[in-house]
Amino acid sequence: MKIVEVAPRDGLQNEKSAVPTAEKIAFVDALGKTGVAEIEITSFVSPRWVPQLSDAEDVFAGITRSPGVVYSALVPNEKGMDRAEASGADKISVFTAASQTFNRFNINATTEESIERFRPVIRRSTVPVRGYVSTAIWCPYEERVAPRAVLDVMERLVDLGVNELSIADTVGKASPDEVRRLLDVILPCDVPVALHFHDTYGMAVANAFTAWGEYGIDTFDSSAGALGGCPYATGATGNIATEDLVFALTASGVQTGVDLDAVVEAAKVIEPYLGRSIGSHLGMVKRGAPPDGDGGRGTGRPT
Amino acid sequence: MKIVEVAPRDGLQNEKSAVPTAEKIAFVDALGKTGVAEIEITSFVSPRWVPQLSDAEDVFAGITRSPGVVYSALVPNEKGMDRAEASGADKISVFTAASQTFNRFNINATTEESIERFRPVIRRSTVPVRGYVSTAIWCPYEERVAPRAVLDVMERLVDLGVNELSIADTVGKASPDEVRRLLDVILPCDVPVALHFHDTYGMAVANAFTAWGEYGIDTFDSSAGALGGCPYATGATGNIATEDLVFALTASGVQTGVDLDAVVEAAKVIEPYLGRSIGSHLGMVKRGAPPDGDGGRGTGRPT
C-alpha cells in the first residue's frame, strides 16, 4: 500500500492562515521521515490564485530529502512545469475535473481546454506526470457526475501520456456504493490509479476499504492532520487524514510502512497556524487521552 | 434498517454540561419525529453515578410519544426496573461488558455478578429487555477482547431471557477486519443483534457497512449530533452520529425511514449546552455551507 501525502499542497492551500516558509520546510522534512512513499509539497501555480503557496521555489530549495521519497508538485501549465523542474521536483501533477462546471469555476476553462493545456506539459516533462481527475463522483455545481465522464477524461489524459492518475471525490460525499459504480466503469486502466478521498460526509475510510478490499486499489492520497478543511463548507472535514487512513488499514492487516506517531507529530508543526486543533481522529485521541492512561475509570458511563 | 437513537441516554451521560429537563424533553420529542424506530431516552441509574440523568422520571412524564416509536431506558437493577416500568418505558436495557476489568471499574462487579443482578430484572420485566454487551472488541484496560468472551456473555444473557442484544465497540477502535472476526464467532444468535459503534478512530461508518453488507446486521445504535464524546479521550469522537450513519446508508440504497434534516434539527436543541458545536459531519456541512450554495467558486483550490 502506497500513501501519497498531500497535506503541504492540497492541505495548506485550503487553510486560511499563512504558514511561514521555514515551517512548511520543517513540515515536509518531518513528513519525509514518516514512511510515506510520496509527498506533494507545493503548487507552481500563480501566487495570484493561491497566495498560500507562493513560496514554492523556496520550499523546494529548503527541504532535506529523505532517500526513496518522491517529492512532487502541482503545475497548471508549461510555466509552472519549468519552475517545478528547475526546483528539482521528482514528479509533477496536472489537474482537471470530470465536471465541466467545476472546471469553469475553478480554473476558468472547459475540460477540453484544460486537457489541451497539459499537452505540451506532458510532452516536455522530464519527470513522471500524475493526472488528477477531480469531482469524479459529486460536483458542487452539477451534483452527481457520470462515471463515463470520468472515464472519458482519464482516457484523454492517458492518451496524452500521463504516467498515473489520481481520481478524486472532491466534495467528499461519495458512498461506498457510488465508489463501486465508478470503479466498475473506470477499471482496468492502462496506468496506475490512485484514489483521493475527502471525508466531508464521514465516508472516506469506508470508501478506501471498498476500493482496496474489493478492487485492489493500492495507492491513496491523504493529508497529515486532516489539513485542508473543505472549501465548500466552513468547518467541515476535508481531506481524509493520513493517520486515520493508515490506522484503519493497519488494523485490517495492510502494511503501509507509515509510522502513525510520526505523522501526528509532523502535523503538529502546522497546528499553531491553523486557528484550530488537528482534525484527525487519531490526533484528537492522542491529544485528549489522560496522561496516566487510566481511561476514565469509574465514570459510570456504559456503552 | 432500524436505527436506535441513543443520544438522550448514551450521549447526554457523557456530556459535561447539565441540560435542563425541559430541553431534554424537547430533544426527545424532536427525535420522535425523525423516523427512528426507537429512542433510549434516559437511565434509571442512581443519580450518584450519573447525575446528568437524575431527572429520568420527569423526562418520561414530560415527553409526547410519537406513535410506533419505542421509548426505552437503561436500568442497572430491580430498583431501576421498577422506576422504568412506573414511568411507562416500552423497553428496558441492561448493561454488562465482555471485559472483566471494564466491568470492575465501570460498575464495580465481575461480569458474572453483573449478569446475576439482571436475573430478577429479566424475569420480572413486563416489557422487552435489551442486553448490552460493551467492550466487545477493545477494552480501555485489557486491549483486545476475545470474540469467545463476547459470545459467552451473549449466551448467558440469552439464557436469562433477554429479547435482543446490542454489541458495542465501546472504545471505538475496531476495524472492519476486527468486526468480521467478532461476527464470525457470535453469529448466528437466537435473538436479534444490534451493533453499537463509536467513531473514536474514524472507522464506525466502515464498520457499519461491513456488518450490514457482509453479515446482514439491520439494527444500529447511533447518536443524533454525535452527542456523547469519548470518556477515554477528551475531545475525541464518541458515538457514531445518527445523521452520518443514515446519510451513508441512504447513499448506498438502504431505506432507514429517517429524515436527515430532522435529526440535525433535533440535535440543535442540545447544542447550546455542549460548549462546542454539533460533532456530526452532516451537522458541520449544513452549518458551514455558504448560504447561496455557490460552493466557494473561483477559489483555485483543486482536488
Image: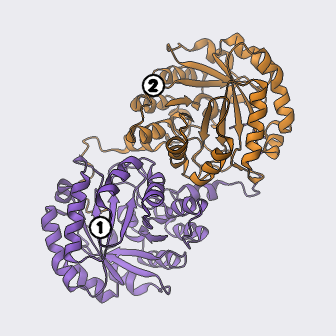
Chain colours: A purple, B orange
Q: Quadrant of residue B297?
A: bottom left
Above or below, comparing residue B69 to residue B286 in the picture: above
Q: How crowded is mark 1: few (under 14 residues within 10 Å), some or many (20 or more)?
A: many
| Horizontal side, residue B238 vs residue B122: left or right | left
Which residue is pictured at 82% across the width and 23% down the height? B119
| Horizontal side, residue A203 vs residue A181: left or right | right
Say what secondary structure mark 2 lies in: loop
| Horizontal side, residue B287 vs residue B27: left or right | left
Q: Quadrant of residue B247?
A: top left
Above or below, comparing residue B186 to residue A111 in the picture: above
User: Same chain, marks 2 and 1?
Assistant: no
Residue B258's disc is: none
Quadrant where the C terminus of chain A sits is top right
Residue A88's x, y, as percent? 34, 88
**Chain letter, disc 1 residue:** A
Residue B278's x, y, as percent? 49, 39
Q: Is residue A300 visible?
A: no
Residue B104's x, y, as percent? 84, 41
**Chain letter, disc 2 residue:** B
Residue B34's disc is: 2
Residue B121's x, y, as percent? 79, 20
Q: Is residue B217 visible?
A: yes
Say what secondary structure mark 1 lies in: strand
Q: How crowded is mark 2: few (under 14 residues within 10 Å), some or many (20 or more)?
A: many
User: What type is the residue that disc 2 sits on?
Assistant: Thr
Residue A132's disc is: 1
Above or below, comparing residue B126 to residue A120 in the picture: above
Q: Judge by depth and name the residue closer to the eye, A277 or B86.
A: B86
Q: Judge by depth and name the residue closer to the eye, A77 or B188.
A: B188
Q: How far apart are marks 2 and 1 (CA)?
A: 40 Å
User: What type is the residue that disc 1 sits on?
Assistant: Tyr
